């Protein structure tokens, strides 16, 4: 055996994929682009596309948006029936109607007085406002602040001395419920108000017999009956 034969025999023969690439006489093709891209980059790209698609669908369909409600006052409310409007009810409706402007969050107003069937006396007043309220607490603050200012200025309408405002559980519909008593020289009324993202409701007991705790419980019943989901 010559030195040349020994050198050739000592050369390591390629095997497997190395043999396939080594034995071809054609130029070696570069790896496809999808073999050169990092799997992490691919995963990140898929995640970004998925997020963008989800946001687009949510924006178009409203998916993920909070449930919207409105207030509908029927002819009967529990054991009471809707009464014809009296002077106080008309004044209250005109007062709220004056604030239904483009720059206010209120978009729909409903006002009704209820009492015992067979009588003409309104013993319960309900006001419903539908709109979009980013801060429900602010809506309650505005209501009770107006009651206090009317007491100080001697205005008509509620116009009594406002007792300590109390917060009560708001029930399954969420939001907030606050109540207070309006004390007059010879009588008193109790009022509760609730607010959530799309409704503000006000209940006034004209009889003077319900304490804030009692009217809060009644307000939960009223709210469950009059606050209905908006179907798109």
Image (spheres, rainbow, N blue to C red):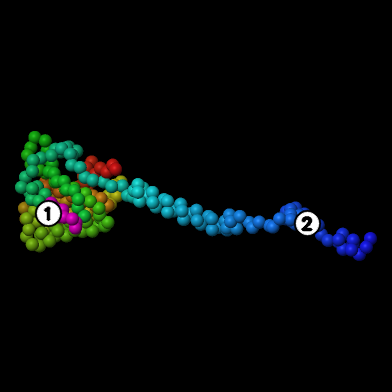
Which residue is depicted at the point 18% across and 55% down? 102
Residue closest to the eye, 224 or 97: 97
* 12 or 3: nearer the viewer: 3
Residue 166 x %, y %:
22, 55
Asked whether, in this view, residue 122 is left or right of residue 25, the answer is: left
Label 2: state its secondary structure: loop
Mark found first going from the N terminus, 1 or 2: 2
Q: Which mark lies nearer to you, 1 or 2?
A: 2
Secondary structure at badge 1 equals loop
| Residue 61 position within the rendered picture, expressed as x and y whole percent measured from the top left | 35, 47
Can residue 160 be seen here? The reply is yes
Report if residue 101 lies within the magenta region.
yes
Q: Is residue 57 above or below residue 150?
A: above
On the image, the x and y values in percent for residue 58 come to 37, 50
Q: What residue is drawn where x is 7% and y is 39%?
A: 120
Farthest-out residue, bottom: 3
* Residue 160, magenta (yes or no): no
Region rendered in magenta = 96-104
Magenta region's main secondary structure?
loop
- Residue drawn at 38 percent across, 51 percent down: 56
Q: Which mark is residue 98?
A: 1
Residue 5 position by quadrant: bottom right
Q: Which residue is mark 2?
A: 14
Disc 1 residue crowd, few under 14, some 14–19, many 20+, Cα 10 Å:
few
């Amino acid at each position: 055996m010559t030195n040349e034969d020994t050198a050739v025999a000592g050369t390591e023969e390629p095997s497997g994929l190395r043999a396939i690439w080594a034995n071809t006489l054609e130029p070696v093709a570069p790896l496809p682009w999808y073999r050169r891209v990092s799997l992490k980059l691919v995963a990140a790209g898929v995640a970004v596309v998925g997020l963008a698609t989800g946001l687009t669908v949510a924006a178009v369909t409203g998916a993920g948006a909070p449930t919207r409600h409105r207030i509908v006052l029927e002819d009967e409310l529990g054991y009471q029936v809707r009464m014809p409007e009296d002077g106080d009810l008309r004044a209250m409706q005109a007062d709220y109607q004056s604030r239904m402007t483009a720059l206010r969050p209120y978009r729909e107003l409903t006002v009704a007085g209820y009492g015992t069937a067979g009588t003409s006396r309104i013993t319960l007043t309900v006001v419903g406002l539908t709109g979009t309220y980013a801060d429900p607490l602010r809506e309650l603050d505005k209501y009770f602040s107006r009651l206090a200012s009317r007491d100080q200025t001697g205005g008509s309408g509620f116009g009594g001395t406002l007792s300590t405002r109390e917060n009560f559980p708001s029930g399954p519909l969420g939001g907030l419920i606050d109540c207070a008593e309006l004390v007059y020289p010879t009588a008193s009324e109790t009022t509760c108000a609730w607010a959530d993202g799309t409704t503000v409701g006000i209940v006034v007991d004209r009889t003077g017999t319900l304490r804030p705790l009692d009217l809060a419980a009644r307000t939960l019943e009223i709210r469950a009956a009059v606050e209905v989901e908006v179907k798109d």
